[in-house]
């Protein structure tokens, strides 16, 4: 925990220095449903984190003046079944949602990790519609919905994704590798199919394991459009 929060503070300071025009909002990102290579007791190829783990990480976020993202990797389960399970935490104004098409493999029946899955616009619209309902029900400020993407096939019918005043949709470039590959992926699969806002993920290990440098704030601010959501792993 201490090392993670130290790194978070370091990145916040770097972004405050690089982009003083935008307030930097720290966040913690928890994969609350984790795709698995084994079917498990439910035969769904996913593991749901215990509520006590979610509560613990939420407490860390509050300690750091951070917001929290609940991330769902469905495996062979249905988003429409899993998402309502987290209303108890999503009803808080500082908790938001992320969904990962890579690990939605219910249609193909493949084992998570052996093939890249996908979501259709209808699935994404369900998630944003669900968040809209929470905003209305609990009188909340707008929610953020992160959709991870690094291939074209991960999101189908992207132009049919609905925009709602109650939900900010962020298409997050989730690929790892050399800087030129990451820029190309951002251009090809995020910028060329615009939805609303854009994000960019940086991997401390995977981006640098072949000797490449980790992209810095100044590099991402040169992108067009410059991403507003930056995730570090």
Image (cartoon, rainbow, N blue to C red):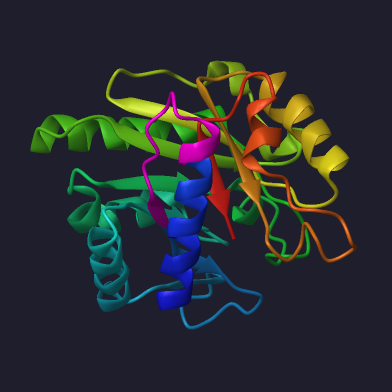
- The quarter holding residue 113 reads bottom right
Q: Viewed as shown, does residue 26 lie left or right of 104?
A: left
- The quarter holding residue 59 reads bottom left
- The quarter holding residue 230 reads top right
Specify whether residue 1 is in view: no
Specify whether residue 209 is in view: yes
Q: Residue at x 22, y 56 (%)?
A: 89
What residue span does the magenta drawing correspond to?
16-28
- Above or below, 5 relative to 19: below
Residue 175, how many percent across, how many down? Answer: 73, 47
Q: Viewed as shown, does residue 25 lie left or right of 20?
A: left
Q: Residue at x 75, y 33 (%)?
A: 152
Q: Main secondary structure of the magenta part?
A: loop
Q: Nearer the viewer, residue 5 or 95?
A: 5
Q: Nearer the viewer, residue 106 or 97?
A: 97
Residue 41, how many percent across, how many down? Answer: 48, 83
């Amino acid at each position: 925990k201490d090392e993670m929060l130290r790194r978070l503070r370091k990145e916040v300071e770097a972004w405050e220095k690089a982009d003083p025009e935008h307030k930097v909002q720290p966040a913690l990102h928890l994969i609350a449903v984790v795709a698995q290579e084994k079917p498990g007791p439910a035969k769904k190829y996913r593991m749901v984190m215990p509520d006590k783990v979610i509560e613990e990480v939420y407490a860390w976020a509050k300690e750091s003046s951070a917001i929290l993202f609940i991330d769902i990797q469905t495996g062979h389960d249905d988003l429409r079944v899993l998402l309502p399970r987290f209303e108890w935490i999503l009803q808080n104004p500082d908790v938001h949602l992320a969904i990962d098409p890579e690990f939605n493999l219910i249609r193909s029946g493949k084992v998570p990790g052996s093939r890249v899955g996908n979501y259709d616009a209808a699935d994404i619209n369900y998630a944003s519609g669900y968040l809209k309902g929470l905003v209305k029900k609990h009188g909340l400020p707008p929610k953020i919905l992160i959709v991870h993407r690094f291939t074209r096939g991960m999101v189908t019918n992207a132009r049919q994704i609905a925009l709602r005043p109650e939900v900010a949709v962020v298409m997050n470039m989730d690929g790892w590798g050399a800087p030129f590959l990451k820029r190309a992926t951002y251009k090809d699969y995020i910028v060329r199919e615009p939805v609303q806002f854009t994000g960019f993920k940086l991997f401390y290990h995977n981006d640098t394991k072949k000797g490449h440098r980790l992209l810095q704030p100044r590099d991402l601010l040169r992108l067009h459009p410059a991403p507003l959501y930056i995730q570090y792993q």
